[in-house]
Image (tube, rainbow, N blue to C red):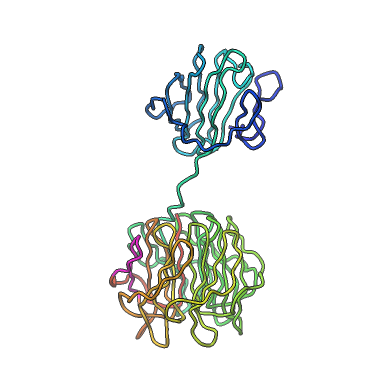
Amino acid sequence: MSGLTGSKINIRGSGRVAKLGTDGQALTSSGAGVGAAFEDLVGGVSWQAVETGSTMTAEAGKGYWVNTTSNACTITLPSSASNGDTIIFADYDRTWGTNGIVIDSNGLNYQGDDDSYTVEYGTDGLALKIVYSDATNGWIPTMEEAVADVPSKGNSEGIFGYGGGYVSITNLVSSAGVVATDTTGVGTARAYLAATEYGDDKGIFGYGWTGSYISLTNLVSNAGVVAADVAGVGTGRYSLAACSYGDDKGIFGYGYTGSRVSLTNLVSNVGVVATDVTGVGTARNDIAACEYGDDKGIFGYGSTGSVVSMTNLVTNVGVVGTDVTGVGTARRQLAACGYGFDKGIFGYGNTGSASSLTNLVSNVGVVSADVTGVGTARGYPLGATQYGGDKGIFGYGEEGGAQNMTNLVSNVGVVGTDVTGVGTARGSLAACSFN
């Protein structure tokens, strides 16, 4: 459907346009915009079974869930109506932006215009309430608003990749938190890199150390397939961190280039890495990062030459904030991931010796005090990622040698006991989610 809420609507034959407000709200017969909350949207109607066909006929006094996942739908209104007759249509599966609805007013006027007009709606999540007035103005939309989607539920699968010994192998994480055996890697083998989600359902590994600082990246598809090297943008470095922001974008930040830096590189929603942005906050390496609040991020902890517990928040447009005095034990070589849809967790790391303690991040970016760790203490960067939409997993790392054990994080931030690892034991790897 080409007709979108807020756009001019196509006309049958006459070349005129129907009257929608420039803000996408329906106009009343007097021309006033309707923008109030629609608490009364569903009052006085009888809701029907979900409609999936390409055509349907509506009746007054009824509400219709219209599912256009497979096809657009043409809706024919009653051929006669009385003042106050009401019909409601709602986008059942948030697909009207792809396959919209067309309303045939069936001989009656629609918002003051006769049925030579083609009335189309094409906005995801739209709820539309129409009420019949009289022969002059006919059916008038009294409410036409897109219902907000629920908060992002996060990706269902994850991937650990690369790592110590300079390998490019990966290990996928299922939606149930089960780690798969090694997959032969694609791209340059390296360690001390970072990874983040982008584009809602994909990931990217970036930067690292091969014996020299590099800035190349490898995209991860929404099926967990790692792509070949992409020539890097920005300053090559290692021991950095990355997280998502803005719901569908990512950010690499901080690290070591021969000296510690605080610069960042944004990742677009199609996986394109931007040039360096002058960093904000204390330059440091061996840092971790995760998302929080559904569309924001946080960098935390690390080393300035000595371990620190400071954090830097990332807005939903990718702007890094100034230092926030840290909470919890200062440490480096830790990992972080999201959990519970809108919260995060920092875990493990090196305080001078390996630790297993964690610090939860609230949905407004507040870091909590230390939680006594569960599982084998380790540092020497391990990886962490979301899985199952609202849970997390810490994996790999080093303590008394390379490890491949994992620890699951519940959707309320509780870390589980050690799970016997799968795949090549290693530290200095990275992880992100996809799908």
Quadrant in the rendering for residue 433: bottom left
**Vertical side of 360 occupied by 331: above or below:** below
Q: Where residue 339 sits in the image (x, y, percent)?
A: 40, 61
Residue at far right of view: 15
Q: Looking at the magenta stretch, what is its main secondary structure?
A: loop
How many marks do you count on the picture? Answer: 0
Residue 298: image location, x then y, percent: 51, 68
Name the residue rendered at 50%, 44% in the picture: 148
Q: Nearer the viewer, residue 141 or 252?
A: 141
The residue at 48%/45% (across/down) is: 149
- Image side of residue 434 versus residue 141, left or right: left
Q: Residue sitting at 66 percent across and 23 percent down? A: 11
Quadrant of the frame with the N terminus = top right
Residue found 61% across the figure and 18% down from its top: 137
Residue 70 higher or lower than 434, as above or below: above
* Position of the C terminus by quadrant: bottom left
The magenta segment: 404-416
Whole-percent x, y for residue 105 in the image: 55, 18
| Residue 289 point in image, percent of width and height | 49, 70
Is residue 23 found left or right of 178 in the rendered image? right
- Asked if the stretch drawn in magenta spans residue 138, the answer is no
Q: Is residue 382 above or below residue 62?
A: below
> Which of these two is toward me, 124 or 27?
27
